[in-house]
Image: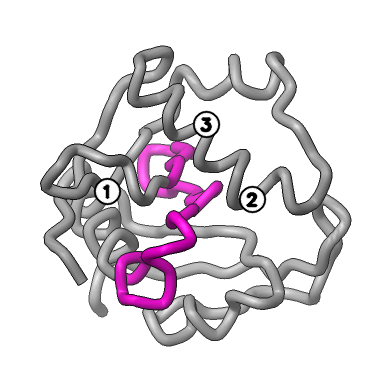
């Protein structure tokens, strides 16, 4: 896999617009769901993280939602199709965990689609509770403690 650099970017910037397009292409369009303006407007206070190739192409992204001063929710994780299954998602999650630890967060939670639960388990996330349906497909709530006991 080629070199990818991770960095945060601000809401309502050209990079943010690219991330919305990527999230739509990978996560929403296959389900026939579109982003609503109201939904996107709530992302102003979230942390936006992207992976960029050496050429500056946005190839992966995620949104991190602070829920408290110690807990953050990871959501909308997307990797471009031509780079999926090459370890990029794992690297981005690990980068996010390190970044969030530096900011003082202790716990990450997420709602994982049924087909990616094993991916997150390999990264140390644990299923919490029963399966539920979100955006019309099965999900599981998962958590990871960033502070080693």
Q: Are marks 2 and 3 in contact (CB under 8 Å)?
A: no
> From the viewer's perspective, is residue 90 above or below residue 98?
below
What is the number of the mark on residue 145?
none
Residue 56: x %, y % from top left: 19, 38
Q: Residue 18's image quarter?
A: top left
Magenta residues span 62-90
Mark 2 closeness class: few <14, some 14–19, many ≥20 residues within 10 Å: some
Q: Are marks 2 and 1 in contact (CB under 8 Å)?
A: no
What is the number of the mark on residue 51?
1
Residue 11: x %, y % from top left: 40, 18
| Position of residue 12 in the picture relative to residue 116 (left or right) | left
Instruction: Give the residue displayed 40% in from the left and 25% down from the top.
Output: 16
Cα gap from disc 1 to disc 3, whole angstroms: 14 Å
Residue 73 is a magenta residue: yes
Residue 12 is a magenta residue: no
Mark 1 closeness class: few <14, some 14–19, many ≥20 residues within 10 Å: many
Instruction: Give the residue displayed 11% in from the left and 47% down from the top.
Output: 54
Secondary structure of the residue carrying tag 3 is helix
| Position of residue 110 in the picture relative to residue 91 (left or right) | right
| Position of residue 77 in the picture relative to residue 98 (left or right) | right
The residue labelled by disc 3 is 20
> From the viewer's perspective, is residue 43 above or below residue 31?
above
Q: Earlier in the sequence, mark 2 or mark 1?
A: 2
The residue labelled by disc 2 is 27
Instruction: Give the residue displayed 28% in from the left and 27% down from the top.
Output: 9
Q: Residue 13's image quarter?
A: top left
Residue 49: x %, y % from top left: 32, 41
Mark 3 closeness class: few <14, some 14–19, many ≥20 residues within 10 Å: some
| Position of residue 52 in the picture relative to residue 82 (left or right) | left
């Amino acid at each position: 896999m080629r070199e990818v650099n991770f960095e945060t970017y601000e809401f309502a910037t050209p990079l943010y617009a690219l991330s919305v397009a990527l999230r739509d292409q990978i996560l929403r369009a296959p389900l026939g769901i579109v982003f609503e303006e109201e939904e996107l407007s709530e992302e102003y206070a979230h942390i936006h993280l992207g992976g960029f190739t050496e050429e500056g192409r946005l190839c992966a992204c995620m949104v991190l939602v602070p829920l408290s001063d110690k807990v953050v929710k990871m959501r909308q994780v997307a990797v471009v199709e031509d780079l999926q299954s090459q370890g990029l998602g794992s690297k981005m999650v690990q980068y996010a965990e390190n970044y969030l630890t530096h900011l003082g967060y202790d716990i990450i939670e997420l709602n994982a689609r049924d087909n990616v639960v094993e991916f997150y388990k390999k990264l140390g996330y644990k299923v919490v509770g029963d399966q539920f349906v979100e955006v019309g497909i099965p999900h599981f709530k998962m958590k990871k403690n960033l502070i080693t006991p």
